[in-house]
Image (cartoon, rainbow, N blue to C red):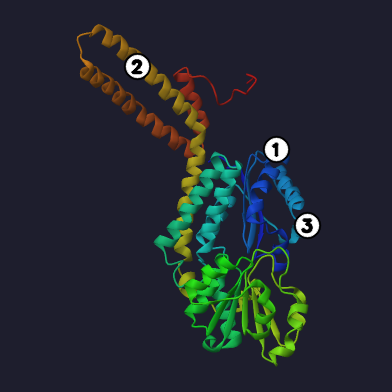
Amino acid sequence: MNIVPVISLGLSHHTAPIEIRECVWIQEAALPDTLKQLRNEYSILQEVAIISTCNRLEIYAVVDDLSHGYEALEDGLSCIQPLSTNNLQAYLYHYAEADAVEHLMAVAAGLDSMILGEPQILGQVTESFRIAQQAGTTGAILSHLFTQAIHTGKRARHETAISQHTTSISHAAVRLAQQHIGNLASADTTVIGAGEMARLAARALQMHKAKSITCINRTRSNAEAIARHVDGHIKDWAQLPEIYATTDMIIVATGAQQPIIHASDIEAVLDLRKGNLLAIIDIAVPRNVDTAVKQLSGVTVYDIDDLHSIIDYGFAQRQATIPQVKTIIQEELTRFMMWYDSRIVVPVIADLRRKVKAVAQHEVEQTLQQLDSLDAREQAIVNQLAHRIVNKILHEPTTRLKTQAASGNGQHHAQVVRELFALEDKITKTNDGNQ
């Protein structure tokens, strides 16, 4: 079996706290330029894709030298975010070859998520692949890898119960609020933001029968769209101080790069709250709440890492599916490695097919010249006959070549076929014609 030249470098909620993850998080809008920058500045990175979510940053690359490839990724990472590589070393993990392939499949299947089996990660992997494709930084290997990883994630969810009894980070945030507040039916709640996580949070609050749900976003129409689906109320951005003074709980999930809730904002209305406690759950990355807010009396602030502490009611059921999901991953890993190994014989198969077809076509043309009495339908029958013969003759050697490639013997057998059929040698010949 040949060595697949894929490496990955990353950090996640398993290895790095939110304080580190928010520093390396890359906005979706910035991903295309980041990918192009890496590809242009580091020639060793033949293909590149990046997964950047609230819980992980992972860079996947195709390289011709593993150690130099890692050096390029680490150097590139230090250029695209504010932390030095030295400060990040303790949090980084590395995967190479089949391990990198298997890791991406596990990520897509939800095995590596903060909430086991959560559904959002598959969409995030799919979107990361789409962005890399549009940026022009993927080639045959990463395209096939991401396509197969996405297929693995879909299989895991369709063939096992890994995604059943599960929850999203937004739903987990609401359950955390329940632990803090108690019965949400008597709580005035607020959702700040209008993205997917904010939408899911508002929906979760509705499902838990919150007394009221107020939606706020800088763009009012986006907040209105969420409020319509949850029978919520709308407030303008300028009314945030009023919200701070009256709400029982805030879930904040905006795409802001800097904190939008500051200690001075909350402190200014504490007297108006008359001792009523305020819970703020910040599920954004980077965090939307200034760390100084935690120091205020009567205010409790949670961030995304605090979700580890809540009870995941469906965990036991989903944990029981892990062996099934791992079996699917191993099946898809084997398929990917067989595909990769077969690539070495693809050129010789194509050349052999072209040569045999050319010979067959030449013989057909000569035969038809001697049978000038045949009409168009009869000539088409002769052509179809030759086509079928070519396919049947080539089927067995094509299958056997691919089997040998999967066993690691592809290059030897491909060379033998080239010599036997006098095909041009494209395996060992370099661009300048030297052997």
Lower position in the chain sequence, tag 2 or tag 1? 1
Q: Residues within 10 Å of mark 2 (few under 14, many from 20)?
A: some
Q: Nearer the viewer, mark 3 or mark 2?
A: 3
Q: Distance between the Cα atoms at labels 3 and 2?
A: 63 Å
Q: Distance between the Cα atoms at labels 3 and 1?
A: 23 Å
> Horizontal and vertical percent for residue 245?
68, 84
> Horizontal and vertical percent for residue 415?
51, 25
Lower position in the chain sequence, tag 3 or tag 1? 1
Label number found at residue 43: 1
Residue picked out by circle 3: 82
The residue tagged with tag 1: helix, strand or loop? loop
Tell me if label 3 and label 1 are in contact, CB under 8 Å.
no
Relative to residue 109, is residue 250 depicted above or below?
Answer: below
Nearest the camera: 302 or 92? Answer: 302
The residue tagged with tag 2: helix, strand or loop? helix
Q: Distance between the Cα atoms at labels 2 and 1?
A: 44 Å
Relative to residue 65, is residue 258 depicted above or below?
Answer: below
Residue 42 in sight here: no
The residue tagged with tag 3: helix, strand or loop? loop
> Horizontal and vertical percent for residue 313?
50, 78
- Picture residue at 79% right of the left edge, 59% below the top: 87
Residue picked out by circle 2: 361
Amino acid under label 3?
Pro
